[in-house]
Image: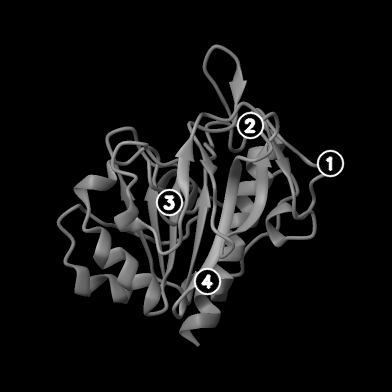
Amino acid sequence: MRGGWILALTLGATLGGPALTAAQSASVRIGVVSGPLGSFASTILTATRIPFEPITAKVPGDSLGRFGLVVIDNLYRLQDLNAPAFKSYVERGGVLVILNPKTDGFTKSWSPYEIFIGEFTLEAKIVQRKHPLFRGFPNDKLQDFADSNGPFVGNCSFTEPAPEWKVLARHAKKSKNAVIVEADYGKGHLLLACTRFDHYNAKPGPTRLGDNLFKYLIELAAARAG
């Protein structure tokens, strides 16, 4: 199936992760779209006292511009949202994250560049070791982010990403499949991540990645707003 631009976010200052300053977090308005399975982003933002606003499926497209950062979270049904509105939001300068996307509804209408969705990820391998997302990682492994009949990382992976996508992490067994990618689009930025965060604040890997990811995205959004 066709893919779109996506990203994952989470935060916390535990297990050695970098903390955001109050000024950084206050400068960016954050919106979170979550479904019936709950929201990793909402849980982490609440725990770390960073304000955010829930966004519903009925959000008017022209109102997205008030947010510097938007998260679509945890197997949300993308077909319930106005894909062109979110795509336009990024093109105009917004930062969009879609965390652990559901395959149903992951269509070309979401994607500025070609990408497809593939099978689940048991373990991933970091490709860009110097990227801010992976600060503090002792090796190139991403593992044990969640558990269902054994540990795994996420419910999907990405196949055949176009050259515009920068691959940050790949599937450990199927190296052609990406797990985290990012790209600029228009004046904005998007990042796709097939990662869960069930073990955030319990395991070093997901906690560190979540902390780094949220810090990175908020800094991107603040820079673009400035």
Question: Which one is closest to the eye, mark 1 or mark 4?
Answer: 4
Residue sitting at 29 percent across and 57 percent down?
109
Kind of residue indicated by mark 4: Asp
Kind of residue indicated by mark 2: Ala
Question: Which one is closest to the eye, mark 1 or mark 2?
Answer: 1
Question: Percent from the top left, x then y, of residue 193?
Answer: 53, 47
Evaluate if marks 2 and 4 touch, with contact meaning CB atoms under 8 Å apart: no
For mark 4, what is the residue? 184
Q: Earlier in the sequence, mark 4 or mark 3?
A: 3
Using a 10 Å C-alpha cutoff, classify the residue at mark 1 as few (fewer than 14 neighbours), some (14 to 19) or many (20 or more): few
For mark 2, what is the residue? 202
Q: Mark 4 falls on what kind of element?
A: strand
- 3D distance between C-alphas at marks 1 and 4: 27 Å
For mark 3, what is the residue? 98
Q: Earlier in the sequence, mark 1 or mark 3?
A: 3
Is residue 93 visible in the rendered image? The answer is yes
Name the residue nearer the viewer: 106 or 97: 106
Q: Which mark is residue 139?
A: 1
- 3D distance between C-alphas at marks 2 and 4: 32 Å
Using a 10 Å C-alpha cutoff, classify the residue at mark 3 as few (fewer than 14 neighbours), some (14 to 19) or many (20 or more): many
**In the image: residue 165, left or right of residue 39:** right
**In the image: residue 108, left or right of residue 214:** left
- 3D distance between C-alphas at marks 2 and 3: 22 Å
Farthest bottom residue?
226
- 3D distance between C-alphas at marks 1 and 3: 25 Å
Q: Earlier in the sequence, mark 2 or mark 3?
A: 3
Q: Mark 3 falls on what kind of element?
A: strand
Q: Earlier in the sequence, mark 2 or mark 4?
A: 4
